[in-house]
Image (cartoon, rainbow, N blue to C red):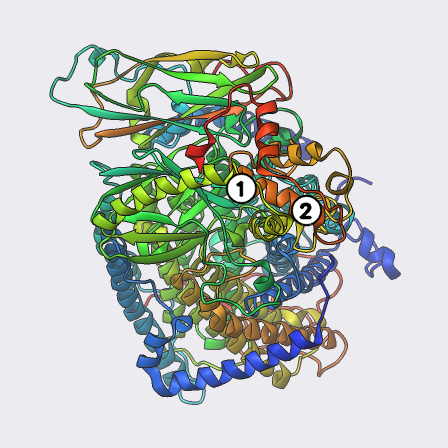
Amino acid sequence: MKKNYRNHKLTTLLAATAVIMFGVAFALVPFFNLLCDALDLNSINQSRARDVDVNPQLAHNIDHNRIISLRFDISYNDDFPWHVVATDPIMHIKPGSRQHTEYLAVNHSKITTTIRAIPSIWPPEAAKYLIKTECFCFEQQILDPYSSAQLPIYYYINPALPDHIEHITLSYTFFDISNFQPSTPAAPL
Amino acid sequence: MNNFFSFQNNVFLFKINKTYRFIISLFSLLLFNQPALAQHPEWRLNLPYGASEIAHKIYNLHMGVVYSLTFIALLIFIFLFFSLFRYRQKKNPQPACWSSNMRVEIMWWIIPTFILAIIAIPATYVLLYTADYEQPDMTIKITGKQWKWHYSYLDNNLAFYSNLSTPQPQQHNQAPKGVYYLREVDEPLVLPTHTKVRLLLTSTDVIHSWWVSELGFKKDALPGIITEMWVNIDTPGTYRGQCAELCGIGHAFMPIVVHALNEQDFKQWLIHKKEGSQQILQQDQQTYALNQLLTHGEQVYMRNCAVCHQPNGNGLPPRIPPLRGSSVETGEPISRHIDIVLNGVSGSLMQSFSNQLSDYDIAAVVTYERNAWTNNTSDLVQPHDITERKAYWQHQPNNVASHH
Amino acid sequence: MNPPDAVVPAPNHSSSPAPGLWRWITTTNHKDIGTLYILFAFTMFLIGGIFALFVRWQLFSPDVQIMDANLYNQAITMHGLVMIFGFLMPVGVGFANWNIPLMIGAADMALPRLNNLSFWVLVIAFIVLLSSLVLSQPGPNAGWTFYAPLSASYGPPSIDYMIFAIHLMGLSSIMGAINIIVTILNMRCPNMRLRDMPMFCWAWLVTSFLLLAAMPILAGTVTMLLFDRHFGTTFFNAAGGGDPLLFQHLFWFFGHPEVYILILPAFGVISQVIPIFARKPLFGYYTMVAALIGIGLLSFFVWAHHMFAAGIATGSQLYFMFITLLVAVPTGVKIFNWLATLYKGSISFEPPMLFAIAFLLQFTIGGLTGVMLALAPVNFQYHDSYFVVGHFHYVIVSGAVFAVFAGIYLWLPKWTGHMYSYRLANWHFWLSVISVNMTFFPMHFLGLAGMPRRIVDYSLQFTNFNMVSSIGALIFGVSQLLFIYIALRSFNHGKPASNHVWQGSKGLEWILSSPPPYHSFHTPPVFTHHEHTSHHHEEKLS
């Protein structure tokens, strides 16, 4: 009888440990979010999300004393069937001011292609201060053969941008996802 | 598996001879010491002092750390050998029996922490210096691609690919090796001195890493991600490096050559380079004889195709098909052959060359492939055939000249 | 077939093993399984060594010697995977299986059937991994770190073999780790507190927790890779909003603890060897334990120091530089404690001690180059160069592998009951120590002069040091054949070993006969602190 009792106690203990460890796994999520935030480790993915401003109370104060130069860059992955150009390769803007620019795209292949543009920002520290309010990169783009399109971006730079950053590169890599499996598009980024 | 155990006698003799030479040079090194070291780059054993401020700072930090750590190592080793010698069993048959001393133990938690903190101070300073990306004078975008580099002068509307130019026979011991074996390219990156050049890096396929040790550091080129570094070269010269991140079978064959010119020469070079791309356009409009195409085609083949398809056209089955005797290279229609070179084959290693090579290059290489080895079709493909084929695939001709 | 309880010895009730091959397949005896692990590990050592020698042959001079880049990339990948997962981890588990029950006075491991399963799963894992070379050319070729996207959309079909094999290896390691933790926590003989355990058991306790925490991360990572390859996810593919850097973060979040999983058991072995041959208790028992735990904890917070050149934010470069430098503190404490153990000892130089001394010297070099690599700005030059190859081979080969030799030479007479030939063992030591330095020291020079790692062919300026290195590798490889001869010969040759084997040996494993009976400690031994530990916390240096 005594032994059974001990087994019973051990089982309870082990089960409790399992439940607690399961809980700890979830408790680690906010911990790592904090860590990655503090170290700018997820800035690459951050620049892809439909942006939420980190510091909205500052967002409308235009900082007239600073000029940030923003370079719009284009890369194609592998054999990309479109030709894309940035209308303003470099923009000089004041933090806080609402801005707008666009890319021009031509599909020079004989088939309808679906593309997705993936933004990437350098320096990584700047990613959370460059806020895209509306961007063609939020959705996939489809172009018929030999047709063209204008791809707009609406954005601003939060004035909380650290003082030492004066140059930001916003690079879009264009991926052909026409043949991407599964055919259903990925969730909105 | 072909050449796994292929063992040629002459290669073996060559090797013995080399070993012998090596032993002699080892002795001469020991005899002549320092001056010999300076003369023989093959005995180089340290970081270069470099040609940019970043490289100098990193070199100085490196030397400082090497000296201080060597000093620490020597202290440890001296104490170790002293204990081993002084307290060997013969000399000290009765060991002490103490096994702890809190004061000493706490001390050697604290002292190393201090030493490391002291080392970390200059390291932090140099790191922040390398991270100062502000106020560049010009911007160049470097794109890694299996297995070549693409350089794009964003402010000057100039772009080109840079390929390994070491001939294939040198890699297979069929020709003597040049001085810059595997570290030479057809189109070097040309940079001005005393100019803060911002380098943007990305990749179109796998991860590559751009490393020239004279310029101070390396940075990865990641697909879909832009990274950045900067360089301000202080001495004109030629600096060599290569890809530093495993990127497939051509990893060892994507070298980097940087020509640093003074600002005046650099401007001259820019003008000259832009004229050069006009010449390529003219080349594309001419007609050539078979032997002209074959000679040029062999060069293009060895530089762009031979890594995978092998100099003898046998490929690396099953992933890379042979070209010798293949229906594409020997059969009709020729347009099928041209299309594969132009557009690549999706889902395979075969990439599209329509933006990488001029029409003249593609015509030459297609002609070469149709006539080399045992593919004696005597077909002749002219640059204008390629131009027509491109037009067929493209509604409006993409301005490829700017890519060349 | 009820699970064994504390009184009934092992499930294998007979006091002698089953005859023939069946014994080895069905065994649940910790000594048999320990032997199997060690034999398997050294088989893998030979296979991984052959890959290494082919690589060094290819790099002997600058041309295509014996293999093209396709085969070369497979050889380096296999060399890494086989040596890490097939040799160093199993040989450590083999040591643990043999020694932990003997050291803590237990009848067997706590979970003997699980023990058998974890060994045979490992064997299957390596059959799967190695068969990919034959069944699916080209074999895995993206390096042992198999960074995406080279291993994802650009990887050959054989990567799937590798993923499956890694799942199995992880399973085996997790089962082994659970077994060791349960054994150490529950099966110590009466009177033995945790702080009375030999340092080897402490090292394995910490290592087991590292294994438990790290291996599932690798399993998760390779599962994500598998999904990216076949099921349309894009964790590591930027085209779908994924991030190729995420793979590196995850891999090194596993990979850095993995490095300590390799080296901590080696620390444990060295902590056993040095007190025996210095005839003096281990100095600083508590700081040794604290350092083990400290290294174990820190290992989970330093991962991105493998990614300084990959384009991470400056702030995180600073953080990872500082915290990586901190790892040097507990590591340094261990070295100082070993030195203090030697100081005022009565030192003799039997083969295990020779290897332990070489470990001290060479591991110090590897540790100090590690401090250099931790400095982010200089790391821009060192990263992915032969300097890194030199560094981690100094830590792993001339460190951990030398500790393995020290351990084998220490316990072999206990395990087999026969002394081996000192003369041959000394030959093995001197050949190894000379050739290992000849192989790996020039690699530092090569890396500093600009040679990247994992290249199949190199420019002429790197020729000389590569030749030195290749010749060293050949000597090192051949001298290991001598080692295998020495070890196998002592199975049934050589003069019988006494129970204590060594003059200075202390601890429960040394009170048993050599070789110990098939089932030892049927009844728990009488453990007294003074007699059976090599450390005394009661006495302090005045």
Whether residue B339 sits left or right of residue B244 in the image: it is: right
Of all residues shown, which one is farthest toward the left? A65
- Tell me the crowding category of disc 1: few under 14, some 14 to 19, or many 20 or more residues within 10 angstroms, Cα based: many
Instruction: Please tell me whether residue A16 is drawn above or below residue B72 in the rendered image.
Output: above
Name the residue beneath numbered marker 1: C214
Mark 2: few/some/many CA within 10 Å (<14, 14-19, 20+):
many
CB under 8 Å between callouts 1 and 2?
Answer: no
Residue B288 % position (x, y): 58, 44
Query: For this view, does B306 lie left or right of residue C449?
Result: right
In the image, are marks 1 and 2 on the same chain? Answer: no
Q: Residue at x 36, y 74 (%)?
A: B77
The chain letter under disc 1 is: C
Q: Where on the picture, by quarter, is residue C59?
A: bottom right
Decide: is B341 above or below B310: above
Judging from the image, what secondary structure is the residue with disc 1 in? helix
Residue B110 visible to the viewer: no
Which residue lies at the image location 71% right of the left edge and 72% below the top edge?
Answer: B8
Work out whether residue B359 or residue C376 is closer to the camera in this orientation and state it: B359
Q: Residue at x 59, y 66 (%)?
A: C56
Q: Amino acid at mark 1?
A: Ala
Q: Which residue is disc 2 drawn over? A: B369
B78 or B221, which lies in front?
B221
At x 33%, y 36%, the residue is C313
Viewer-proximal residue among A67 and A37:
A67
Is residue C469 shown above or below A39?
Answer: below
Q: Position of residue B172 (x, y in %)?
A: 62, 64
